[in-house]
Amino acid sequence: MLGVNCKTEKQIISLMMIEKTGQQDERLRVNLRQLEVFVATASEGTTRAAAGRVSRSQSAASAALADLEQALGAKVFDRAGRRLSLNENGRALLPRATLLLEQAGALQSLFSVEHAAELRVAASFTIGEYLLPDLVAQWTIAHPQSRVRLRISNTSEVIAAVAGFHVDIGFIEGPQTHPDLVAYPWRRDELVIVAAPGHPLAERPATARQLSTATWIVREPGSGTRQATDAWLLAHLSRLDVAFELGSTEAIKRLVAAGAGLGCLSRQAVVEALSSGWLVELKTRLPTAERQLAMVMRRDKTLGRATEGFVRHCAEALGGA
């Protein structure tokens, strides 16, 4: 009887050890190093470039990817020679892996004040060039250990950067949306029509007919300002004769000042040019064109302390909530 009990006890212990080992393997098959290499490879396209980004050898990076795919039981890249492209599995894994690495980084620097996390911000051109610089300068003076990396591009590219975890927060002008993002109203902005002081329409209020036959210089498709311009002008004019589509607000201002056509830009972008007199605001019978500027963030992203502070700083500086 005693022998039976001993045998039974050994069997139970053996089963418990197997179960415990199985649970441990289930939990620890994927590690942060593997995910770090995966995210770097997804960004760079090759294990060689990814290895340099994460300070590992190419063989170690390739081994980490192989271990990751073995642990997951699925391939995450399509391979064409040395080039690696995310497949359906990889696209599903990327946002979760990026978020997990960000959280791990925040945990690692939680008690290290001298190594404050870098703030990654993207902004559309009008906001990035005319509204954010002063706010960033004020922030860095008050928080010298908090570095801000500001990326300036059009609204479509800002949304893509936030959705892809390339930046922590975005500032946009247009009404574009993305299912993974949430937008918070930030401040109001006004569009104005500008011309050279010697333009034929600069002396008296322009009619809708005159504006319809004028030559226009506008921002490129995908720009928030272009979206707002089209929505405003096409609702009141019979046509819009666009001669130039430019990705630079400053270039538009210079062309307008040279007499090449009319421009439609944010008041924030032309306030200095209007005050100095090298551009004039065209008077029209059109209704005032206002738009909402917004901050955008991922719905599933947990903001760090520095990012929350910067968001609060930008809101409070403009009298926001």
Image: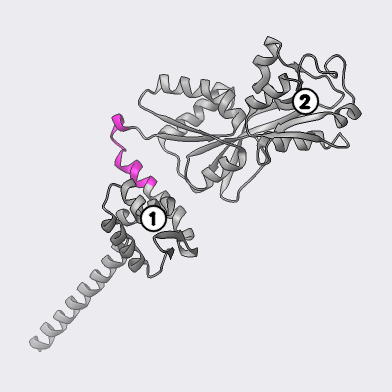
Mark 2 lies on residue: 262
Question: What residue type is disc 2 on?
Answer: Leu
If the image is split into quadrants, where does the N terminus sit? bottom left
Q: Is residue 186 left or right of residue 94?
A: right
Q: Is residue 245 left or right of residue 11?
A: right
* Residue drawn at (31%, 32%) of the image: 115
Q: How far from the left and from the top, in percent, is residue 43?
A: 43, 50
Q: Earlier in the sequence, mark 2 or mark 1?
A: 1
Q: Which residues are magenta?
A: 102-115
Q: How far from the left and from the top, in percent, is residue 197?
A: 77, 14
Question: What residue type is disc 1 on?
Answer: Thr
With respect to residue 309, does 64 lie above or below?
below
Q: Element at badge 2? A: strand
The answer to whether the residue labelled 2 contacts the one labelled 1, judged by CB atoms less than 8 Å apart, is: no
Q: How far from the left and from the top, in percent, is residue 158?
A: 56, 40
Looking at the magenta stretch, what is its main secondary structure? helix
Disc 1: CA contacts within 10 A as few (<14), some (14-19) or many (>=20): many
Q: How far from the left and from the top, in percent, is residue 104?
A: 34, 47
